[in-house]
Amino acid sequence: MKEDKCNNILAKPSGITLGQHRSDVVSEVSDICQIFIGTCEKYKKLTGKDLAMRLSVSAKWHDNGKACPKWQEACRKDFQSYQLWKHNHPTCSFKEYSSEKRNEAGYNLRTVGIRHEFYSLKEAVVTNMPIPILAAIAAHHGKLGLAFEDKWTSCPSFKQFWNEFRKTSNDISEKESLALVCDKLLEFDTIRGLLQFADHRASAKEDKEPVPGLNCFNYRFPFENKRGIQKLVEDNWNNDILLVRAPTGAGKTDASLLWASRQIAVHKADRLVIAMPTRFTANALSVNVAATLSDTGLYHSSAWYSKYSKVQNGELDMKEALAQQKMANLLATPITVCTIDHLLMSLTFTQESHHLICSNLANSCVVIDEADFYDDFTLANIIFLLKVLHNWKVPVMIMSASLPESALQLYIKAGFNIESILEDKESDSYNKCFNIKKLIEYDDIQDINYLLKYCIERGNAIIYLNTVDKAIKVYKEIKALVLGSGKDIPIILYHSRFTEKDKQRKENMLLDNLGRKAWNNGTAKGIAILTQIGEISINISSELMISEICPIDRLMQRAGRLCRFDNSVGEMYALIPYKDNTLYPAPYGSYSQNEKSWIPCKALLSTIDILKAGIYSAQDLVNILNKVYSEEAVFSIKAQTNVQALEQMLINNWLMNPVEKWNDDDTHSNSWRSRDIGPQGLVFVIKPACTHFYNYSEYMEFVLSYSISLPVYLLDKGRKEHRIDSDCKITIGSNDPIFINVIRDGFYTFDIGVDLTNNEEDNFL
């Protein structure tokens, strides 16, 4: 029998009844608990409570406040408005009604001045419900935060709840105990996050929106035999943490999947999270893992285009793509590849979604892949992340080709018990050699002109430059030399100042010309000019490499692209850049505003001092690595102060969201940064065809297709030199107009990217 919505309590102006919605959320909660078995077991061990029971109770009570007569009256008025519209549009949904009648749809609920979750609390409190459930009900629309204090305190009956939440928060925060806060976070956030997750999934299904399925991690080793490092990892899977050092090509990715499958099989985790140092490396690994496991999420600020570019050619519906992206953001996919920044940012609790991200992170096993060791600022952040993961009893594996022995003591300080770094010294990869023919000091490109001609003569080469502008200058020089030679050699420049669409095309060109298939077919030809973006993320190879000097752990990654697909001896020329007769170390150091010059980091100076011409194996490089990083890392005052700010944010914000909000694309708050870089801004390579975007999602599609992130000082430079205009006004939904940066014609091309070269060489990646 069809439900009579006029006589039932409504949950939404679309006509969904409260009984139906409650049933839908309870059903989602049940499905979640059946899939997230490890989460339920960890919760039981931590609290002694049944998570499924607590979630079910929160689901049954979370919207009971909608029965409040005043709220119901407003909802019914909105439902009646929808019904009148639907009479003339019988096949259309409430979503379509909302799109056409943006101001009318839901107007009465928006103006009635009632927060239904407050009334839900008032109903629930008489049952002596535990405070973690009350907090979940209070927060399920993101209003449990200091920015909404006036809404809570305006009514005495709701103020008592606010005071209780503040007292609970302060009682824990004031103890300044990271372990205690981590425990309380799990007890509260597992319910808080999963209730919201279930509620959002139920609502999306009710609105006929795409909802990705909840799937279990499922991996089968695809090869007949396991390699050395894979056997070592599997044999030691039960350790709380594994440190794994293995050269390029040793099979680290499948080793991590084998390790994760063991953790998940015994319910120590429900999913695998792989954290990469940059979004570019995350893109590449996601594609690699997805070849074995299709249900792999990718999340970072530009991931949408890299992972879901099928939307552009109509193979995938945009709504489905955005729904999958949201799952990856929340770490709710069986495998999520993301940046380290994304995990660090979730510890600030400056967004409501951070509570669910942290709950899912706490019930994951985590692989940190190829973290930089020379960068003490980022490393200090990672050590704090590891302390939190240790408190949450999260299995961790750190794997890299460049992991020094001194890392042992550093990671022990995070609380883990570690005896040694796992390493397969019998691997063939450790016998592989390459020849550093010469170390060359140079100040001007003309100083190395003969090497560029040699690259053209050889027909294939990879050239690494440490700054974008130097890479652009070398590209222009080589293009001119090739043109003069009359030879047909592809020259491919790749750095971070391309749109996501063009990055994808660049990567495809690199693979077509210098990838494994090209070498196997005997068709490999071309010169790739790369910045740090190409150290890990691109699976290409050459017989000849020219590389500006960098810390040994970065140089090891670059050398891994020499004769990558065979056992030949590759040839390298190492360049030591100078500027005005002084070593120019950017970006491997710090810039002194007082001196107006760069101060090289210790690892770079040690690498220059130790590295000599000669033939090297991977093991030789490991020996140099251990010399360069022979001492345990000592964090700078800046790095220590920054980490202390992150810890304080976690301790202060664990229950009550702060007033400060954080955009997804940012890497810093007012007091903390994930990386020691300056503020960034967007520049667009074209003006939008229409300057009004219906909603934020429509705007983000434009952003992901046509924008590039640049340091703010470079944007200022571009404006001063009349290469960037800032007078293009757009609107997003009903928000106030904003102005966007648009690069002028001629200063962005597919060959070069954004070209702001003018004696400026402090731009990286």
Image: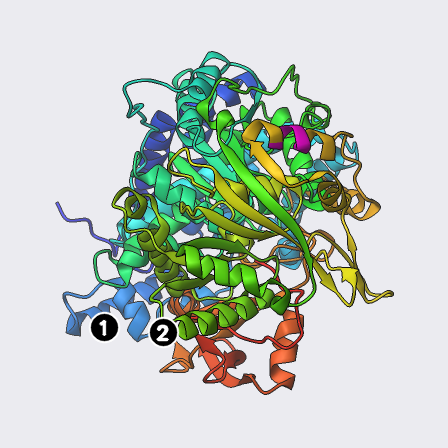
The residue singled out by tag 2 in the image is 104
**What percent of the width, then of the height, locates residue 69?**
43, 55
Secondary structure beneath label 2: loop
Please name whichever residue, 697 or 591, is drawn nearer the observer in this view of the structure.
Answer: 591
Q: Amino acid at mark 2?
A: Glu
Please name whichever residue, 717 or 204, is drawn nearer the observer in this view of the structure.
Answer: 717
**What percent of the width, then of the height, locates residue 263?**
45, 20
The question of residue 623 being in magenta is answered with yes
**What percent of the width, then of the height, locates residue 600?**
77, 52
Q: What secondary structure predominates along the stretch shown in magenta? A: helix
Please name whichever residue, 15 or 94, is drawn nearer the observer in this view of the structure.
Answer: 94
**What percent of the width, then of the height, locates residue 351?**
57, 51
Say whether disc 2 or disc 1 marks the residue closer to the N-terminus.
Answer: 1
Which residue is drawn at the image coordinates 65% and 17% (left, top)?
418
Which residue is drawn at the image coordinates 31% and 27% (left, top)?
218
In the rendered image, the residue lying farthest to the left is 1
Q: Is residue 683 above or below residue 239?
A: below
The residue singled out by tag 1 in the image is 85
Residue 626 shown left or right of residue 326 in the figure: right
Q: Is residue 444 above or below residue 552?
A: below
Q: Quadrant of residue 409?
A: top right
Query: Would you say residue 376 is visible in this rendering?
Result: yes
Q: Quadrant of residue 336?
A: top left
Q: Amino acid at mark 1?
A: Trp
In magenta, the rendered stretch is 621-625
